[in-house]
């Protein structure tokens, strides 16, 4: 149980499941626990509830329910999108394009394609730390079958020009498949797969107050994918195995609850981020790494003279929880910060604060007070 003194500022890593999610899942676990593939009424009831959740996710994405495929999470969705599309369309076209700042699950999928003999083109940010639509579009040629680009970077909050890049790609090469990892943008910044010109799009449950172990892949009608596994016919045969209906229904409930007050939540988070930046600016040796026009939910900054690992332990001892970057990197440097032109010494002292609407100004003040205390105890007394 989390104590009342705990200050959790790591929502880009995971969020606390909402009451709506927990309530919906509890009912599925204790009352409506049928197998949705069973032909009897108990199974049909479970199937209907899962389909209702599919509609809830689709409503949040602005797409048809039939375009939503449930998976075990963002990593599986990203692998199914990248590998599944490349294997379906890459027989003759063996070039694929991505960026150097993708999440580890996307980078890993492209590494697998490279090992299979695909030509992988990785576009880096320019000297100003910006990825441009022109750079992505210029990398696509007649031999390209797939482009994958994230919407919001999970370490810095940079919002990538997915809409402009995919639109440019589709104008010149309409047959190229486009995939977007939208995990850190879902229910945080406005978009639809159609407006992004995305054929495939990844979202995750535990980033939006659902549980871990559930995600979804938007799969545009008519786009072919080759599945990663063989077995049953669940999820159109592309994701075989008995569906985890409690996780699916909890995901739908959490998303439906969030959609009801998206604007007010975004306003709250924007205010928290602005206040955090204001208070950090009053501290010596603090550099803000996130762009001013980045996601309001993520703020990356560096504290001169203090290594990230040291700071994480210092804050954790005070029950203040932040991160040094992607949780999937397990504390190791991912290299993404340097790709955004953040100097190595700053990257080594970087912290990532990520907000949700349940955070408060009091928590921001406590964080900044703890940082000031760390500077006095760990830097000034050396």
Image (cartoon, helix red, strand yellow):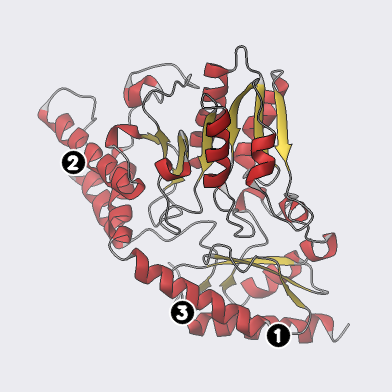
Specify whether residue 107 is in view. no
Mark 1 residue crowding within 10 angstroms, few (<14) / some (14–19) / many (20+): some
Instruction: Give the CA distance from mark 3 to mark 2.
Output: 37 Å
Percent from the top left, x then y, of residue 355? 51, 68
**N-terminal of the two: label 1 or label 2?**
2
Percent from the top left, x then y, of residue 111? 69, 30
Residue wearing tag 3 = 360
Farthest front residue in view: 171
- Kindly report which numbered mark, 1 or 2, lies closer to the viewer in this rendering: 1
Q: Is residue 144 above or below residue 149?
A: above
Q: Quadrant of residue 55?
A: top left
Percent from the top left, x then y, of residue 122? 72, 37
Residue drawn at the location 77% of the way across and 84% of the way down: 284
Instruction: Give the CA distance from mark 3 to mark 1.
Output: 19 Å
**Of 142 and 238, the residue lying toward us:** 142
Assign a secondary structure to mark 1: helix
**N-terminal of the two: label 3 or label 1?**
3
Q: Is residue 282 above or below residue 276?
A: below
In the rendered view, does 320 fall on the left or right side of 380?
A: left
**N-terminal of the two: label 3 or label 2?**
2
Mark 3 residue crowding within 10 angstroms, few (<14) / some (14–19) / many (20+): some
Residue drawn at the location 59% of the way across and 60% of the way down: 157
Assign a secondary structure to mark 2: loop
Residue drawn at the location 68% of the way across and 61% of the way down: 324
Residue wearing tag 2 = 32
In the rendered view, does 84 fall on the left or right side of 153?
A: left
Percent from the top left, x then y, of residue 129? 73, 56
Assign a secondary structure to mark 3: loop
Q: Is residue 323 above or below residue 122?
A: below
Farthest top residue in view: 92
Residue wearing tag 1 = 372
Q: Are marks 3 and 1 in contact (CB under 8 Å)?
A: no
């Amino acid at each position: 149980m989390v104590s009342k003194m705990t200050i959790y500022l790591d929502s880009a890593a995971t969020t606390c499941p909402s009451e709506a999610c927990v309530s919906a899942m509890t009912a599925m676990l204790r009352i409506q626990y049928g197998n949705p593939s069973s032909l009897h009424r108990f199974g049909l009831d479970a199937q209907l509830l899962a389909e209702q959740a599919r509609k809830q996710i689709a409503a949040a994405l602005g797409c048809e329910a039939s375009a939503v495929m449930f998976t075990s999470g963002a990593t599986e969705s990203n692998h199914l999108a990248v590998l599944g599309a490349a294997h379906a369309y890459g027989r003759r076209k063996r070039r694929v394009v991505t960026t150097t700042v993708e999440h580890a699950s996307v980078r890993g999928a492209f590494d697998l394609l490279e090992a299979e003999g695909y030509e992988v083109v990785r576009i880096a940010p320019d000297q100003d730390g910006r990825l441009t639509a022109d750079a992505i579009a210029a990398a696509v040629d007649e031999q390209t079958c797939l482009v994958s680009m994230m919407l919001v970077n999970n370490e810095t909050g940079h919002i990538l020009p997915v809409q402009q890049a995919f639109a440019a790609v589709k104008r010149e090469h309409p047959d190229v498949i486009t995939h977007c990892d939208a995990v850190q943008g879902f229910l945080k910044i406005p978009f639809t797969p159609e407006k992004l010109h995305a054929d495939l799009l990844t979202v995750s449950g535990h980033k939006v107050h659902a549980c871990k172990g559930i995600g979804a892949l938007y799969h545009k009608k008519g786009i072919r994918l080759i599945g990663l596994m063989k077995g049953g016919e669940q999820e159109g045969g592309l994701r075989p195995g008995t569906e985890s209906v409690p996780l699916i229904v909890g995901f739908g409930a959490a998303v439906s609850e969030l959609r009801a007050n998206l604007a007010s939540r975004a306003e709250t988070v924007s205010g928290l981020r602005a206040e955090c930046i204001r208070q950090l600016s009053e501290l010596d040796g603090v550099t803000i790494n996130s762009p001013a026009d980045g996601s309001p939910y993520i703020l990356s900054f560096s504290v001169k003279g203090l290594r990230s690992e040291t700071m994480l332990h210092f804050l954790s001892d005070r029950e203040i929880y932040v991160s040094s970057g992607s949780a999937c990197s397990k504390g190791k440097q991912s290299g993404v910060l340097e790709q955004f032109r953040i100097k190595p010494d700053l990257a080594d002292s970087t912290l990532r604060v990520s907000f949700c609407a349940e955070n408060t100004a009091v928590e921001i003040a406590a964080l900044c007070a703890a940082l000031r205390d760390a500077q006095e105890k760990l830097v000034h007394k050396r």
